[in-house]
């Protein structure tokens, strides 16, 4: 456990009450209540002491462990010198848009020294989600697993002996023994599952202050990189400084037992390949939804995604390396250092080899080979249980069709708006775009308040384009390096342009990755919704041919869709959740640089199908762009 700084005295009492809950008895819904104290903490890695931001002294933060149908109540106390919100990534938030936690979209950040209570239900979802800060780059260290268990305790796959969240990213777990103090037996029974929630969270280790990192990326800076990858907050023994090897995450197993690994990618920059030497996986879920079981020896997880896999401990008792490797496009794309972290799977009764033989290592793909990511996702299909058939039925008709190109562009600095030199010139700021619009993030107000109050004038418009302004060869590799070909396509509008849908409209979107100044993939996350992933492909989407590939029978339901490098992905959803819902790429530099918009979903015909008023705990924006006291 990391040693706490002086902040420890601030939340000693809070930690003891951090997971108070009304127990689930006989399958009945419960109220699960936790307190998040957000504060600064000093940690030492790679010979440097770095001040980071954490929740309750934990890195990653505490797991929220609930049962389908429960009501979740989380009290957030902000002891940072910065404002922040907490987003419940993947929770559908049916008619609870006010609790979504998207900074400056659904609420203004919680002021330094302020508090906020989030209250919402979890229904119709089972599996692994996660939570994270949603202002600037703070999610690099302020994050944790969000586990929803089936109400009847039964899975559509063999019940594992233990479930283990694997958080690939920044984070470190601590014991929760002190959380049991003062709880009665029923409450302890409800928390028992939490004791096994040691998420496999993937991410990166940053020594640069995260607020400064945000400022630099906002100015189009691509020069800052993390120092290492992490698994559950541990850098692993591939990282060392002055001969001191970093600690590795260790997963203890018993031969003959199965383990549900909840793999979450919290990284700011990278998609990861994850393997365990000598073992295979069965993928059974993703983003809080079941999948048709799929066997593989490698999991691919993009930022924002959560993948559930079963691992059977059937190898000879020994030590085995697990490896998380970040992939990236090859040159001429800009390159970041190779990010790799490794941990250990340790069998009960196994001893370190006395002859110092090397522990088995998995064979990893080349970091520049992104095709395994593409084929991994193409092999996944949805699994609907009988009681879920209606929700898992793809809308047969389409009311709204959008083709959205994803790439980079530029805007001129200063007052020069049209005649500046392009091609990564100092006269321009590189921005991320959707249909040549770069989202202008406000830092003064929340869009949902203006929508609810009927005062959008001067704040946002509702004319986000349904197609790119001009067609071109979206995946032409000649567009990656700066030059006259891409310069003609760079000019970008910086604006807050949204799109409105009527209630119950069926929406189909084709996301098209482009090669403008880079050829990266794009993990697109839509708040408030799960979407059907109908198909994906390489190259440019061709509506005359590619529609034939659409899977209407058993597509995946996802909240984060990885649009492949040099390719496209088609999704469809029913706009049945009224409110204001943020859509953005989950690469942090893309979101900061403007690859985002928001969808307005109108009220339905009844109070039960309409956005309710703000709840009593909601705090409106103050004049300084932070929540009111």
Image (cartoon, rainbow, N blue to C red):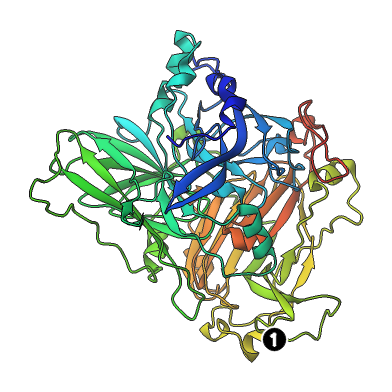
**Figure check: 530 above or below 419:** above
Is residue 593 at least partly visible in the picture? no
Residue 111, picture quadrant: top right
Q: Residue at x 80, y 48 (%)?
A: 447
Residue at the limit of the structure toward the left, as seen here:
355
Identify which residue, 172 or 451, lies in the foreground: 172
Residue at the limit of the structure toward the front, as seen here:
242
User: Residue 161 at what x, y percent from top left?
Assistant: 29, 29
Residue at the limit of the structure toward the top, as seen here:
184
Please identify the quadrant where the C terminus is shown: top right
User: Residue 556 at what x, y percent from top left?
Assistant: 48, 50
Q: Is residue 629 left or right of residue 564?
A: right
Q: Residues within 10 Å of mark 1 (few under 14, many from 20)?
A: few
Identify which residue, 80 or 446, lies in the foreground: 80
Q: Residue at x 7, y 50 (%)?
A: 355
User: Residue 334 at what x, y percent from top left?
Assistant: 51, 75
Please identify the quadrant where the N terminus is shown: top left
User: Residue 290 at what x, y percent from top left?
Assistant: 43, 41
Residue at the limit of the structure toward the bottom, as seen here:
484
**Figure check: 331 above or below 167:** below
**For the residue labelled by badge 1, is the local secondary structure a helix, a strand or a loop?**
loop
Residue 224, picture quadrant: bottom right
Identify which residue, 288 or 522, lies in the foreground: 522
**Figure check: 393 above or below 120:** below
Q: Is residue 623 left or right of residue 481?
A: right
**Figure check: 525 above or below 620:** below
Is residue 302 at least partly visible in the picture? yes
**Which residue corresponds to mark 1?**
488
């Amino acid at each position: 456990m990391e040693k706490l700084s002086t902040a420890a005295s601030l939340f000693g009492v809070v930690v003891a009450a951090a997971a108070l809950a009304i127990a689930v008895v006989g399958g009945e819904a419960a109220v699960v209540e936790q307190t998040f104290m957000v504060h600064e903490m000093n940690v030492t890695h790679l010979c440097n002491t770095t001040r980071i931001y954490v929740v309750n002294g934990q890195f990653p933060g505490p797991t929220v462990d609930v049962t389908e149908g429960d009501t979740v109540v989380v009290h957030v106390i902000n002891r940072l010198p910065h404002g922040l919100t907490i987003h419940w990534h993947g929770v559908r938030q049916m008619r609870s848009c006010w609790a979504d936690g998207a900074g400056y979209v659904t609420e203004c950040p919680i002021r330094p020294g302020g508090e906020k209570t989030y209250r919402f239900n979890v229904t119709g979802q089972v599996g692994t989600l996660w939570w994270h800060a949603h202002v600037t780059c703070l999610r690099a260290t302020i994050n944790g697993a969000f586990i929803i268990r089936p109400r009847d305790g039964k899975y559509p796959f063999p019940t594992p002996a233990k479930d283990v969240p694997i958080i690939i990213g920044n984070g470190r777990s601590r014991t929760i023994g002190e959380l049991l103090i003062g709880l009665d037996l029923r409450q302890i029974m409800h928390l028992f599952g939490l004791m096994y929630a040691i998420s496999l969270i993937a991410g990166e280790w940053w020594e640069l202050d995260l607020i400064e990192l945000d400022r630099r990326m906002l100015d189009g800076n691509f020069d800052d990189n993390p120092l290492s990858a992490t698994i559950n907050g541990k850098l692993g023994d591939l990282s060392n400084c002055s001969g001191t090897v970093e600690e590795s995450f260790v997963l203890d197993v018993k031969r003959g037992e199965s383990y549900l690994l909840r793999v979450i990618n919290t990284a700011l920059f990278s998609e990861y390949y994850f393997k365990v030497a000598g073992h295979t996986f069965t993928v059974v879920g993703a983003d809080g939804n079941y999948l048709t079981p799929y066997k593989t020896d490698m999991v691919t997880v993009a930022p924002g995604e959560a993948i559930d896999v079963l691992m059977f401990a059937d190898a000879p008792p020994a030590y085995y390396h697990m490896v998380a490797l970040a992939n990236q496009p090859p040159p001429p794309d800009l390159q970041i250092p190779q990010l790799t972290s490794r941990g250990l799977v340790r069998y009960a009764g196994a001893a370190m080899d006395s002859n110092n033989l090397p522990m088995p290592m998995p064979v990893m793909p080349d970091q520049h080979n992104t095709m395994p990511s593409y084929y991994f996702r193409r092999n996944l299909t949805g699994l609907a249980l009988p009681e879920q058939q209606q929700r898992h039925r793809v809308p047969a008709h389409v009311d709204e069709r959008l083709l959205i190109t994803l790439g980079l562009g530029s805007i001129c600095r200063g007052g020069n708006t049209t005649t500046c030199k392009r091609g990564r010139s100092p006269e321009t700021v590189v921005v991320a775009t959707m249909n040549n619009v770069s989202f202008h993030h406000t830092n003064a107000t929340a869009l949902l308040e203006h929508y609810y109050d009927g005062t959008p004038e001067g704040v946002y418009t509702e004319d986000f384009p349904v197609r790119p302004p001009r067609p071109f060869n979206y995946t032409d590799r000649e567009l990656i390096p700066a030059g006259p070909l891409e310069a003609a396509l760079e000019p970008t509008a910086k604006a807050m342009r949204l799109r409105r849908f009527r209630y119950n409209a069926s929406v189909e979107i084709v996301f098209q990755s482009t090669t403008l100044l880079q050829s990266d993939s794009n993990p697109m996350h839509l708040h408030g919704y799960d979407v059907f992933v109908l198909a994906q492909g390489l190259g440019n989407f061709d509506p005359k041919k590619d529609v034939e590939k659409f899977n209407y029978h058993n597509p995946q339901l996802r909240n984060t869709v990885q649009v492949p490098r040099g390719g496209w992905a088609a999704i469809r959803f029913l706009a049945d959740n009224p409110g204001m819902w943020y859509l953005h790429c989950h690469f942090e530099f893309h979101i900061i640089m403007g690859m985002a918009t928001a969808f307005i979903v109108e009220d339905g015909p009844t109070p039960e199908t309409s956005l309710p008023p703000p709840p009593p705990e909601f705090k409106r924006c103050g004049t300084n762009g932070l929540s009111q006291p």
